[in-house]
Every structure is written in structure tokens, then in C-alpha cells.
Image (cartoon, rainbow, N blue to C red):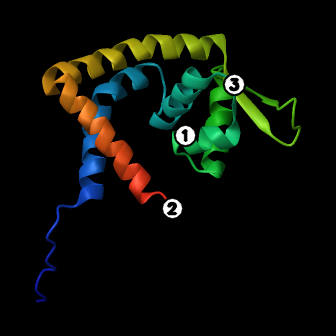
């Protein structure tokens, strides 16, 4: 049997995934109650933050690959959560916006999600949570291609 490979650092990608799953475990029941997948919620969150958004930006900010985004948007459009249209400034591009139904869902779900963030802030402390955000922003910037 081969000896195990020695690592001097903890598995950061796994820890980040584990942290994501721990946080999402609080949000998922509310999402499922409204028939939303994680991906659909990420799309609605982007639209809730920015309004009318070009599909490429939705893909980047929601971390959904283009081909997958097409299917996600089709289901969301079918369910009356979003609408798609050609960009009036550039007919080659498509823009997406939340419908009234989609915006109501964002408003409703954002209350419980914000309550969970407030709980995290009380539990960790405002300074630690701010530090966590800052460290994650620094890590992302460090790892982005030049």
C-alpha cells in the first residue's frame, strides 16, 4: 500500500464548499417551499440586486455556465418568475428581469435570508463577519487571473 500524500495545509476548496453548504442548509428549505432550486435563487438574487441584467452578467454573477443558464431561465420564464427580451441597444444580446411574481419572491425570501445573516453577525460578531467578507474578497482577488 502506498503511503498517504502529505499536505501541510487544510483543504481550502473543501472547507469553502463545506461553509457554503452549512449556510445554504438554512436557506434551502425556504427555497424548496417556493419550488426554487439553488440556481434559480441565484438568478433571482442577481436580478433583485441589479434589475434588468444582460444574460452574460447573470451567468457570471450567479456562477451558472451558459448552457445551464439557458435551461434555468426557460423554466423560470415558464413559471412566470422572469421575462427575457432583446437588448434595445444591441439586438444580439438578451436581457432578463424579474416579473412582479419574481420580485415578490425575492422580497419574501430576502427577509428570512437577511434574518439568518443577522443571526450570523450576532453569533460571530460584527467585526468577525466583516473580516470574513474582507478575507473572502481578498482571496477572490488574489486568485483571479491577471
Label 2–label 1 contact, CB within 8 A: no
Crowd rating for badge 1 (residues with CA inside 10 Å; few <14, some 14–19, many 20+): some
Residue depicted at 52% across the width and 45% down the height = 63
Q: Earlier in the sequence, mark 2 or mark 3?
A: 3
Q: How many marks?
A: 3
97 relative to 19, above or below:
above
Q: Which is in the foreground here, disc 2 or disc 1?
A: 2
87 relative to 140, above or below:
above
Q: Position of residue 126 (x, y in %)?
A: 21, 23
Secondary structure state at the residue bearing disc 3: loop
Q: CA distance from mark 2 to mark 1?
A: 17 Å
Towards the viewer: 2 or 79:
2
Towards the viewer: 91 or 41:
91
Q: CA distance from mark 2 to mark 3?
A: 28 Å
Crowd rating for badge 2 (residues with CA inside 10 Å; few <14, some 14–19, many 20+): few
123 lies left or right of 39: left
Residue depicted at 64% across the width and 32% down the height = 75
Q: Quadrant of residue 143?
A: bottom left
Which residue position holds label 2?
A: 145
Residue depicted at 64% across the width and 10% down the height = 100
89 lies left or right of 129: right
Which residue position holds label 1?
A: 61
Q: Earlier in the sequence, mark 2 or mark 1?
A: 1
Which residue position holds label 3?
A: 52
Q: Position of residue 55 (x, y in %)?
A: 69, 39
Q: Position of residue 5 (x, y in %)?
A: 16, 80
Q: Earlier in the sequence, mark 1 or mark 3?
A: 3
Q: Quadrant of residue 27?
A: top left
7 lies left or right of 140: left
Residue depicted at 86% across the width and 43% down the height = 92
Amino acid at each position: 500500500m502506498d503511503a498517504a500524500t502529505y499536505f501541510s495545509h487544510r483543504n481550502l476548496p473543501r472547507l469553502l464548499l463545506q461553509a457554503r453548504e452549512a449556510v445554504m442548509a438554512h436557506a434551502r428549505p425556504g427555497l424548496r417551499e417556493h419550488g426554487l432550486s439553488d440556481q434559480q435563487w441565484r438568478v433571482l438574487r442577481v436580478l433583485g440586486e441589479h434589475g434588468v441584467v444582460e444574460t452574460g452578467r447573470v451567468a457570471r454573477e450567479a456562477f451558472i455556465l451558459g448552457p445551464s443558464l439557458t435551461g434555468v431561465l426557460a423554466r423560470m420564464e415558464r413559471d412566470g418568475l422572469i421575462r427575457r427580451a432583446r437588448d434595445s441597444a444591441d439586438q444580439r444580446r438578451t436581457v432578463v428581469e424579474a416579473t412582479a411574481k419574481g420580485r415578490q419572491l425575492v422580497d419574501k425570501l430576502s427577509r428570512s435570508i437577511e434574518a439568518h445573516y443577522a443571526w450570523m453577525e450576532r453569533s460571530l460578531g460584527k467585526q468577525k463577519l466583516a473580516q470574513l467578507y474582507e478575507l473572502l474578497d481578498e482571496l477572490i482577488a488574489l486568485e483571479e487571473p491577471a
